Amino acid sequence: MAILKFEDGRQITVLEQIRKELEPLKIELSHWPIEKTAKVTPLLRADTLTDAQKEELLSCLDGRFEEQRAKFGYQTRDLVVLHSSVPKIEDMLKIFDKCHRHSDDEVRYIVDGSGIFGFTKADGTQIMLTVESEEFIRVPAGAEHWFVLDQNRRIKAVRYFTSKEGWVANYTGTAVHSFG
Ligand SMILES: [Fe+2]
């Protein structure tokens, strides 16, 4: 269940209300159930996955990708697995946790675990959105944001890209505010 936090400490947990708050930023948030088949379940439960296992899981989830590809022209997808036991995890997290923008949409289908996206609003204030398994988020190209893991330190997310280059960030230098 998604949670939206404001700088003043307020928080919202009702999906429809969260969507309303995200609307001016043109961020889409949806709930997409996962069919927990005998093939999918152990792959979701594993802390880390080999490249072959990632591909196996992706192929089970490709129905969603095909739908979105037809609508939005996404070209490639991959699976990002972040967990305390992933080698060099702290270095990987450092590239996500500073304010940045992309020329491509940031599209994530969270299939295991959870994480936190931060966004800067038009008035300069910031919000933090916790997303978890079975939630789909599309952050439009150009929107200033950052990403951190939450206390669970675990996420698996399918990423969709329109460009062949994959994940490329333009850092903005904006500081991440402290939240009450
Ligand atoms: Fe990003």
Image: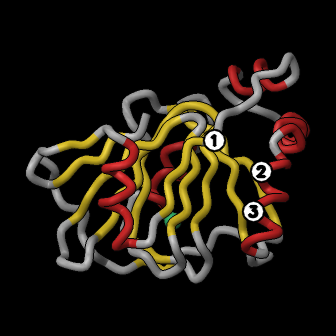
- Is the distance from the Cβ of mark 2 to the nearest ligand 1 atom less than 8 Å? no
Residue 64 disc label = 2
Exactly how many numbered labels are in the figure? 3
Query: Alpha carbon of mark 2 to alpha carbon of mark 1: how far?
Result: 9 Å
Residue type highlighted by circle 2: Arg
Asked if residue 60 lies left or right of residue 119, the reply is right
Across and down, in percent, residue 3 comes to 33, 41
Residue at image position (39%, 44%) is: 15
Does any portion of residue 41 appear in the rendered image?
yes
Residue 68 disc label = 3
Q: Earlier in the sequence, mark 3 or mark 1?
A: 1
Q: As rendered, which of 147 and 61 lies closer to the eye?
A: 61
Q: As rendered, which of 22 and 57 lies closer to the eye?
A: 22
Residue type highlighted by circle 3: Gln
User: Are discs 3 and 1 less than 8 Å apart at CB?
Assistant: no
Residue type highlighted by circle 1: Trp
Residue 32 disc label = 1
